Amino acid sequence: MPRLHLICNGIFTTSIAGGDIHCLRLARSAAAAGYDLNWFGGHALQEVLHKHQMPGTITLTDAARMGPVDGSALRGQWAMFSDFAKRFRATLKLRDRIQPEDFVYAVSDYWFDVLPVVRCAARKKLMIFHMQAPSFLQVVRRSRPDVDPARLASFHYWLSQNSSIAAFRRCPRKRLLYVHPAMRPRLLRRGYRPEELKYSSFGVDAELARKVGPQRKTYDAVWIGRVHRQKGIDDLLATLVYLKARVPDFRAVFIGNLKKDLQPLVEQHGVADCADFSGFVSEEEKFRLFHSSRVFLMTSRFEGSPRVIGEALVCGVPVVAYDVENYRPLFGEFVRYVPCFDGAAFQREAEHQVLLLRGGANYLSRLNLDQFGRANAWETLEREFVETLAELEKA
């Protein structure tokens, strides 16, 4: 039985998001195809694997799970860096458990996952490139919305990603998975060969969205995300104020565990009476809420390959978004774009789509949503990942 080691040192809480979910889905598909999984990671990862009933064994790389820290403060960022460094050093000490005939996969583009892959004995190596880090100048000038005020975490991200991509390029037998079409030419310029690069979509559970099926439209607008300036929270709240004033009996829903952070802002803007908080929900309930909504408001100022847009689309929910450079190559005509960060234009388009949907008109009905769903379904990604492992075996 071929063995696949997954280097996963970046999980430090049991709350997982986009890239982590992507990793679990691909790993499960490899196990179903007959690969023996072994994870390298900490106690938080162990809890995640147990919670999601993931197959395989784990090689622990820390003595205990890191306690809660404030990731927005310099002290918290340093604590996280130190914790990552401990798991990295432990992985290097334990890398003799990885044999030359094994497969090894860096589940992120951070140094603490990639460098152990580069330095281990396995001859068949994979890593994934999830999102383009800000450039050095973008960090210095703080010209990209996800650059934090202290900049330390953003400098770390920039340096980590660039050093990881350079180090992995030197591996002779490898596959680098990338999740956005624009990444491919950049990687080719960095010296990668075309056959070493494999596209892997963001992934959506199109089958679950189909099973949940159409629901009565309870909400005019839906939003899911985290409370951060990158997500365009100010623009979101301003849009809700606008829609409340313009659309009779307007209602919106926030999906996720957001009430603590977002409710004070909702009350401050006077829209608490027309906004509901779902709290933490299952995947099935998330899709039910999407189906119950008319328009998804994507106010983010920057994203990599946002799965949440895909999830809205496979539920037949129109999306209004800023025309940031990453979206069109992924979503094309499936999204209604407005000029970047023109809040007034965003509000007008959101109102237009809400009123159209109230009248029974949905632009998505003219498009091939089934094809979009099949192309980005988890089943498609999982099959392609197993095929990539087979290609690497034969390379």
Image (spheres, rainbow, N blue to C red):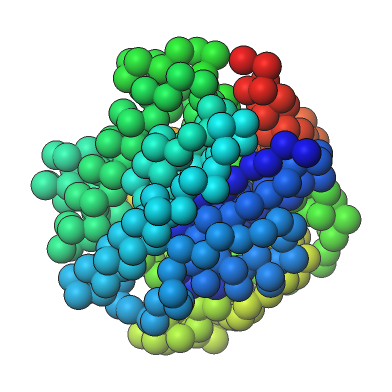
Q: Nearer the viewer, residue 194 or 201?
A: 194
Q: How many marks?
A: 0
Q: Nearer the viewer, residue 61 or 204?
A: 61
Please tell me which residue is depicted at 71% across the width and 25% down the height of the picture.
390
- Position of residue 96 in the picture relative to residue 333 (left or right): left
Residue 194 at x, y = what percent?
A: 50, 13
Residue 22 at x, y = what percent?
A: 61, 49
Please tell me which residue is depicted at 33% across the width and 31% down the height of the picture.
167
Please tell me which residue is depicted at 11% across the width and 47% down the height of the picture.
140
- Position of residue 379 in the picture relative to residue 128 (left or right): right
Which of the 4 image quadrants contains residue 226?
Answer: bottom left
> Can see residue 122?
yes
Please identify the quadrant where the N terminus is shown: top right
Please identify the quadrant where the C terminus is shown: top right
Which of the 4 image quadrants contains residue 231?
Answer: bottom left
Q: Nearer the viewer, residue 265 or 41?
A: 41
> Can see residue 107?
no
| Extreme-left residue of the structure | 140
Please tell me which residue is depicted at 39% across the width and 37% down the height of the picture.
119
Which of the 4 image quadrants contains residue 343?
Answer: bottom left
Residue 325 at x, y = what percent?
A: 39, 34
| Extreme-front residue of the structure | 96
- Position of residue 178 in the picture relative to residue 372 (left or right): left
Residue 152 at x, y = what percent?
A: 18, 58
**Vertical relation: 179 (above or below) 262:** above
**Vertical relation: 5 (above or below) 198:** below
**Vertical relation: 331 (above or below) 210:** above
